[in-house]
Image (cartoon, rainbow, N blue to C red):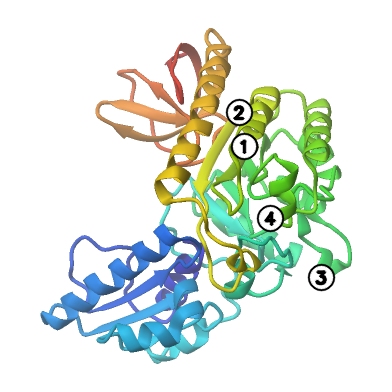
């Protein structure tokens, strides 16, 4: 999404009309920006390319270009299998893609993006690539090693986003906690957070994709120091059985993870911890699944997502036999989510009667949907507000929680 926003910003600066996913169909050129992360994303990318090629064959489009991770990883195969695409580009070939439009890559355009999100929130990509060697992950194959962006550049981009109406930014990278090691020879995520927290008008800063091994605890100090840094941490753990963690090359044990979670909660009481897990990794046994469920019951994370394992060429896990059928992976994922569903409901029930500050995202079916600082966009809970008062997206209001559901809250304006 961020890469598409940057591309669109560059095209606009070169006086080329551009729009994200136009419904009007008044465009003559399409750029498909693909994902190659897991099977479902690859399938969606290929289907989108085929749809656009078909439109071109019917005379509705002049050109179809393809860029992004799938194109980076499988360009040769795709070129021979899908005709009708005018050119393919990898993840690092934005200047080449712009040349197709006789456009120049303008390096001075730091932070000039055409947002595809609602105007009150945006993602801020602080680094690209990853130096980790997790056995299931193909990201380093598509994105290369970790490259941090300088703090000054990121502050400048945040300031531009705020001027355009953004109130909340979500810090993203393939691996957030490695930030700064390549550029400054030390982890500097906490310093970056402090610099961003000083940006006037930036109300919420949220952290996504932290890595548990050698977690920089000073990040939590920064969280405590600034009210506009959300007490929220998204830290994908992937599993909790030591056998699986070892096979996944996660460089951490379950005992160390539990200790880290206790330390984080002790340092930032009331912090919202989100994690993601993988079900059906090669060699996973029923005992491993039971261990993972027990871990969830003990740790009681606020938010959890579960993916089924995707067997990716070029990863070290690809040498293992993908020995668990797809439907069994789904069953295990469902079983794990059922444990979390109960925890989520109990945690939501604890919020009934409390007054929470929320940001309004949109109006849907006559009611407003908002989020607390403990909820990120699209992946977490929403707060339903029933009111006749007119609210604007991006507005902050206080809501008294009156009802709790598995994954949502309902409340009234205070």
Mark in the foreground, 3 or 4: 4
Q: Nearer the viewer, mark 1 or mark 4?
A: 4
Relative to residue 219, is residue 131 depicted above or below? below
Q: Callout 1 environment at 10 Å: few (<14), some (14 to 19), or many (20+)?
A: many
Which residue is the site of mark 4? 248
207 is higher (above) or lower (below) than 90: above
| Mark 3 lies on residue | 183
**Does the residue at mark 1 contact the one at mark 3 (Cβ under 8 Å)?**
no
Q: Earlier in the sequence, mark 3 or mark 2?
A: 3
Q: Earlier in the sequence, mark 1 or mark 3?
A: 3
Write down the quadrant of residue 61 in the picture: bottom left
Q: Nearer the viewer, residue 356 or 310?
A: 310
Helix, strand or loop at disc 1? strand
Query: Which residue in the structure is indicated by mark 2?
Result: 302
Q: Measure the alpha-carbon separation of dots 1 and 3.
A: 28 Å
Marked residue nearer the N-terminal end (1 or 4): 4
Q: Which mark is residue 10?
A: none
- Is residue 15 found left or right of 287 in the rendered image? left
The image shows residue 257 at horizontal and vertical percentages of 78, 39
Of callouts 4 and 2, the N-terminal one:
4
Residue at 52 percent of width and 20 percent of height? 342
Q: Is residue 52 left or right of residue 135?
A: left
Question: What kind of element bears circle 2?
Answer: loop
Dot 4: element? loop
Residue 396 visible in the picture: yes
14 or 140: which is nearer to us?
140
Disc number placed over residue 274 in the picture, else none: 1
Asked whether disc 1 touches disc 2, contact meaning CB atoms under 8 Å apart, the reply is: yes
| Alpha carbons under labels 4 and 2: distance apart | 24 Å
């Amino acid at each position: 999404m961020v890469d598409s926003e940057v591309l669109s910003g560059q095209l606009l600066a070169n006086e080329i009309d551009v729009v994200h996913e136009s419904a009007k169909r008044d465009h003559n050129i399409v750029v498909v920006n693909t994902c190659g992360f897991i099977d479902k994303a690859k399938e969606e990318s290929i289907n989108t390319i085929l749809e656009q090629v078909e439109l071109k064959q019917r005379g509705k489009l002049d050109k179809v270009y393809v860029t992004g991770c799938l194109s980076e990883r499988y360009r040769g195969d795709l070129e021979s299998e899908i005709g009708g695409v005018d050119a393919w580009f990898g993840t690092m070939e934005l200047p080449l893609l712009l040349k197709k439009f006789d456009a120049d890559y303008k390096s001075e355009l730091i932070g000039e993006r055409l947002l595809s999100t609602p105007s009150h929130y945006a993602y801020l990509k602080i680094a690209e690539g990853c130096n980790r060697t997790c056995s299931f992950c193909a990201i380093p194959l598509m994105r290369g090693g970790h490259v941090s962006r300088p703090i000054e550049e990121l502050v400048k981009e945040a300031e531009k986003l705020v001027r355009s109406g953004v109130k909340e930014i979500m810090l993203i990278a393939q691996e957030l906690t490695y930030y700064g090691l390549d550029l400054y020879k030390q982890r500097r995520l906490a310093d970056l957070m402090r610099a961003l927290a000083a940006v006037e008008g930036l109300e919420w800063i949220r952290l996504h994709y932290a890595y548990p091994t050698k977690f920089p605890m000073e990040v939590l100090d920064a969280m405590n120091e600034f009210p506009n840094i959300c007490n929220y941490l998204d830290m994908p753990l992937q599993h909790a059985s030591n056998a699986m963690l070892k096979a996944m090359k996660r460089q951490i044990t379950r005992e160390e993870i539990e200790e880290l979670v206790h330390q984080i909660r002790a340092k930032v009481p009331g912090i919202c911890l989100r994690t993601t897990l993988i079900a059906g990794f090669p060699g996973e046994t029923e005992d491993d699944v039971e261990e993972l469920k027990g871990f969830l019951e003990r740790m009681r994370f606020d938010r959890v997502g579960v993916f089924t394992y995707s067997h990716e060429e070029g990863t070290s896990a690809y040498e293992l036999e993908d020995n668990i059928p797809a439907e069994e992976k789904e069953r295990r994922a469902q079983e794990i989510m059922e444990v979390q569903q109960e925890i989520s409901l109990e945690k939501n029930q604890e919020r009934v009667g409390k007054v929470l500050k929320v940001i309004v995202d949109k109006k849907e079916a006559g009611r407003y949907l908002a989020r607390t600082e403990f909820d990120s966009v699209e992946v977490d809970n929403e707060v339903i507000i029933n009111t006749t008062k007119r609210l604007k997206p991006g507005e902050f209001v206080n809501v008294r929680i009156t009802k709790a559901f598995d994954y949502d809250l309902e409340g009234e304006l205070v």
